[in-house]
Each structure stands twice: as C-alpha cells, then as structure tokens.
Image (spheres, helix red, strand yellow):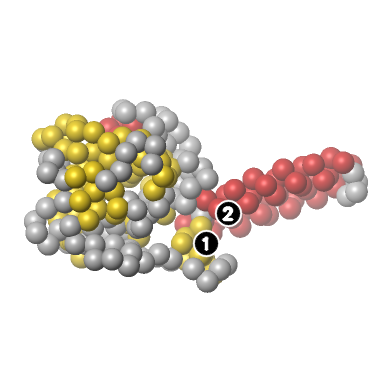
Amino acid sequence: MVKPLKRIRRNIRLHSEGTTTLILGAVLIVAFCSLIGYGFGFDSFWFYLVSGLLAAVYLVVVNFFRCPIRRFEEDPTGLVLAPADGTIVVVEEVDENEYFHDRRLMISIFMSLFNVHANWIPIDGVVKIVRHYNGRFQAAWLPKASTDNERSTIVIEGADGTEVLVRQVAGAMARRIVTYPSEGEECFVDEHLGFIKFGSRVDVYLPLTATPLVEVGRKTTGNQTVIAKL
C-alpha cells in the first residue's frame, strides 16, 4: 500500500503523495529566489532573507511528507493502535449515526502541520466498508468536523467479529484525503490506511466495552501507540 518517493534515511522515506507538491514547490522557490537575486543582487540582504524563509517553509513541507517505516513488535491481538501521529483531542462516549447507529467510544487524534500525515491500519481484520463524503473544510479540532467536514469512513472487522470504524477527516487546510484499502480486503497493522494533506484528524469508534489507554493531550505515534484494548 505504501508507495515511497525515495529513501532519505534507513527507516524514513518521503511519501509518494508529496511528489508533485515537493517538485513543484522546489521549482517555484528556485524561480522566485532567482528573481529576487537578479533584482536585488545575489549577495543582498533581501536575497538571503527570502531564500532562508522559503527554505524553512520547504523543510516543514518535507517533514510533513515523511513516510516512516514502522513495525509493531508485539502481538496486536485485542489492541487498537493509533492510526496517526498527533495529539489526542477526544476520548468520550458519543452517538455514532453513520454506520453503528448507537453509542461508541470515540478517540480522536489531531494532526498538526508538523506531524507526519500518513495513516495506519489500527487493527488486523477485513475491510467491510469504505465510503467518502464531500463536506466542509472547517478547523479539524472542532467537534462538528467529524460529521460536517470532507471525510472518509473505513470499517474494519477483527477476527473475533468486533468492528472498528476509522474516519479520516479533512481540516481547514486539507484538500485531499487518500484511502488505500478496498472493501473485502484483508488489512493488517503496519500497513498504511491512507494519507491526508495538510492539517486534519483521524477518529476511531470502538465498542463501549473497549478500555481506553490514552487521555486528552497525549501525543501519539502512528502504528506504535496503543490507544485502547478491546
């Protein structure tokens, strides 16, 4: 499922979803800095200032498109792994009215611009549904973002029949959600679920019998942090 652009370290790559953005960004930065250099001089204060600022912004974008190669070393049976890098912003019981139509334990992870935005499969199982919904692009940390924003819903059924719903939610800056699994496919932790470009969140809906192992404010690492026990 992962299509890396190129290897930059032994266990970190750049994600293929960033290929166009990174190439186009580099071309535009070089062109703009060249104009500044020709206009003010390549040894001028303005050339160094603009070049430095644009280089810093570009490095942030490169960091955003990192694609870490991770393996969960323990037995994942009965565990729910964080589907994303970020910060826990919600751990509460809510009404889930799209698929389950009942009360569920909701755990939400907000991804800032500085987080890796690749998403991981949270449990081993079979993909039951994959649905995409058009919507708004309001701030991802708002409660209504889960139901009003552009989003994709993936339901995974574990070996024991437990169903887990994962929702990729676009944020104010996000304009593209990519989901890799298809309905009927087997999926496993360590595999990528998808990718969301520029600021977003991922919600996980679990049965009320699940035990949350994280609290609001906790930092998570995708495919490494255990967020709940089924």
Q: Secondary structure at mark 2?
A: helix
Return the x and y of residue 225 as percentages of the image width and height.
34, 53
Q: Position of residue 32 (x, y in %)?
A: 75, 46
State the residue lying farthest toward the left. 161
Marked residue nearer the N-terminal end (2 or 1): 1
State which quadrant residue 73 falls in: bottom left
Q: Nearer the viewer, residue 27 or 161?
A: 161
Q: Judge whether residue 150 can be spotted in this image.
A: no
Q: Residue at x 38, y 41 (%)?
A: 218
Residue 132 location, quadrant: top left
Residue on which the image places disc 1: 14
Q: Nearer the viewer, residue 21 or 159?
A: 159
Above or below, comparing residue 152 to residue 14 in the picture = above
Which disc is residue 227 wearing?
none
Label 2 neighbourhood size at 10 Å, few (<14), some (14-19), many (20+)?
A: some
Across and down, in percent, residue 89 comes to: 36, 35
Q: Residue at x 16, y 31 (%)?
A: 95
Which residue position holds label 2?
62
Mark 1 secondary-structure assignment: strand
Left or right of 160? Residue 56 is: right
Q: State which quarter of the image contains the N terminus.
A: bottom left
Q: Is residue 109 above or below residue 137?
A: below
Q: Amino acid at mark 2?
A: Val
Task: Indicate the amino acid at tag 1.
Answer: Leu
Mark 2 touches mark 1? (CB < 8 Å): yes
Question: Which of 128/31 is in front?
Answer: 128
